Amino acid sequence: AMAMTFTAFKFWLAKRSISQATSVCGFILLTLIVLGSAYATTQLLLHQPAQQAEIKSRLGNGYKKFADRYKRFNDYLAVVEVLQLYNTIKPDNTVILRRIASNYQQLNQPEKANEFLYQAIAVGLKRNANAPDNVPTLISLAKSYHKIQRPEKVSLYAQQAYDLAVKKVKQVDDKEQAYWYYWLAKACEQLNQQPEALKYYRKAYKIMPGNYRYERAYYKKRHLMEKYYEADWTEGLYFN
């Protein structure tokens, strides 16, 4: 915008017989006006609650993208630093807290890793107290406890999530079933029922093949199963 303003001003000056000194003064004045307007506009937007939320959202997305880039270079310290910036603008995101912990583990700093894992657990327990039947919260708790090697807690919360998801699948219509099959698969993963998890990811994807989340989850799981499992079970899962 500033470049376009200066270009327009230059063409306007070029059509008039104006001295060099006047031209320079005009550009200086225009620079001050543009900078002042930019500053005032920025401050106005920053103090609007809706705009603040949008700015935080865009910053958060940027931090996550940079974290993914640093991860590809195994720069775990940079990943931690970027994700902690994300955590300051969007606190209590258990996925981010677990990612920070995982990268501290890669840096051989188990104490720092546990600090963030226990933060994730505290957030999950608080949410669970407010909404005991929230399946994503139950899965989140199972994942966090899995990280600190508490299998009895993993089993407790994952089984609760599984039972709730099974009940929901029977109560909702076809399109809503995809959502609950997806979370049923997540519960199966935490219960170490991997073939079942793949089956439910496939069901979610087949119900809503245009949904990127379900498609990605299904093919990612399928790839892992093909890589680590020797199986006669694959044909039945893929084609039934």
Image (tube, grey):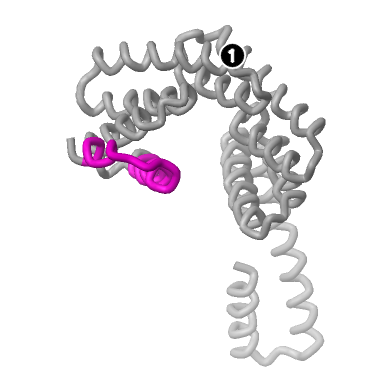
Q: Position of residue 48 (x, y in %)?
A: 63, 36
Q: Position of residue 30 (x, y in %)?
A: 72, 70
Is residue 61 within the magenta segment?
A: no
- Judged by its main secondary structure, the magenta piece is helix
Residue at 45% in and 18% down: 135
Residue at 82% in and 31% down: 111
Q: Is residue 6 visible?
A: yes
Q: Secondary structure at mark 1?
A: helix
Query: The disc labelled 1 sits on which kind of residue?
Result: Lys
In the picture, which quadrant includes the C terminus?
top left
Q: Position of residue 194 (x, y in %)?
A: 40, 31
In the picture, which quadrant includes the N terminus?
bottom right
Q: Which residues are magenta?
A: 215-238
Relative to residue 101, is residue 200 drawn left or right?
A: left
Residue at 29% in and 29% down: 178
Q: Is residue 212 visible?
A: no
Is residue 216 within the magenta segment?
A: yes
Q: Which residue is mark 1?
A: 153
Relative to residue 225, is residue 147 drawn left or right?
A: right
Residue at 75% in and 33% down: 113
Relative to residue 67, is residue 194 drawn left or right?
A: left
> For the image shown, how many numbered marks are present on the structure?
1
Residue 3 image-quadrant placement: bottom right
